[in-house]
Image (spheres, rainbow, N blue to C red):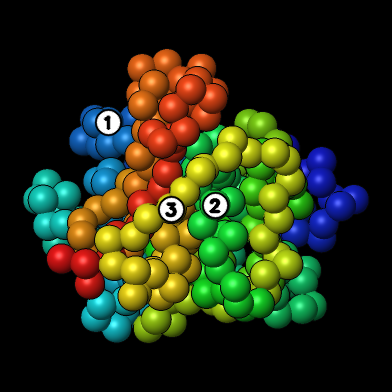
Amino acid sequence: MDIRLLEDRTPLARCAQTTVQNELVEALLVNKLQTEKYRSIVPVVANGHGRGFPAKHVLSYLVRRALRIVRRPGTYDLRLESKHFQSFSTDELEEAALEVTRIYEHTQAEMSKYLSQQTIALSRGIDGLEASVYAKLFEEVKEDIIPYYFQTLTFFNHLFTPFRRAIEFKIDCPLEWVWASAYTVKELELPGADEEFLVTCPLPCPVMHVPRQQFTINSKVAPIDRMTSGSTKYLPDSLPEALSALMQEGFEPDDWERPFARYNFGRWEERLMALGRWFDSKAAPHRRNSVRIRSKSAH
């Protein structure tokens, strides 16, 4: 999307864009240059936001290093794996961290020129199977204020709804949490009705308490019939983290040390997917689909 075309909708369109000046950071983000050394890197923007991909680990480390983000042990975030760093030297990573700092300072300086308020409206969304599970879990949350847990880097949109997803989630994000955006970094100006905002929560415990009404189910989602828990006693505490995981990364748990949602296929759904879901609901109600919540307290 050509950001300049949005000038009548947001003052951010007047921000000056910088270009990424470090080859490693460029490769981790979008890898358009395809430099010889980093050609094999699958960038975070093209791949999505799965926590199992090496680029997510390396870029998360660089952001934490550059912005001095230190998480309290045991809090929700990506657990970095050393195997993803073996091909990079310390000097290489330090130079990349300096570029991460430069991008952040540029983004903050440009946004502060055109926004008088200290927050910005951002949104995320999910669709498909994740939305179905999310809707079922959301029914179980009774509180009016819901914790939302951030990873080191969480992707959002600003003006545009998140791909007209079935479920949308909106926040008033502190400006100082925005590391980079399509308005300030040329490489993030991508085709389609999407303006990438990469948000990093600097708090030791990366959580924002969000009013319930900021979560919206926009369209009918395929129903999930029941929900079970490996540890019923701790289910209320597990739900917000499971919801955050679904909203950010879908069904991609990295280990057993945090709650997550797992979809259990119905009797016929595993073979026939959509047709199987319908068949199970009609012919085999005792084997219909479900979602299971696990937490570290359960094992």
Q: Is residue 193 visible?
A: yes
Q: Is residue 295 above or below residue 283?
A: below
Percent position (x, y) of residue 144?
66, 77
In the foreground, 91 or 240 = 240
Q: Amino acid at mark 3?
A: Met
Q: How many marks?
A: 3
The mark nearer the N terminus, 3 or 2, is 2
Horizontal side, residue 180 vs residue 230: left or right: right
Q: Which residue is mark 1?
A: 39
Camera sees residue 185: no
The CA span between labels 1 and 2 is: 41 Å
Location of residue 284 in the rendering, given as x and y in whole percent from the top left corner: 44, 27
Tell me the crowding category of disc 3: few under 14, some 14 to 19, or many 20 or more residues within 10 angstroms, Cα based.
some
Q: Is residue 266 left or right of residue 108?
A: left
Q: How would you rate the neighbour count of disc 1 (Cα within 10 Å): few for under 14, some for 14-19, many for 20 or more?
A: few
Q: Which residue is mark 3?
A: 227
Q: Where the N terminus falls, by quadrant?
A: top right
What amino acid is labelled 1 in the image? Arg
Q: Which residue is mark 2?
A: 136
| Alpha carbons under labels 1 and 3: distance apart | 43 Å
Q: CA distance from mark 3 to mark 2?
A: 8 Å
Q: Nearer the viewer, residue 45 or 95?
A: 45
| SS for callout 3 | strand
Left or right: 203 with respect to 65? right
Q: Amino acid at mark 2?
A: Lys
Of the image marks 1 and 3, the number of the one nearer the N terminus: 1
Image coordinates of residue 91 in percent, x first then y, are: 17, 61
Q: Residue, x 32% and y 35% (percent of image)?
A: 42
First along the sequence among labels 1 and 2? 1
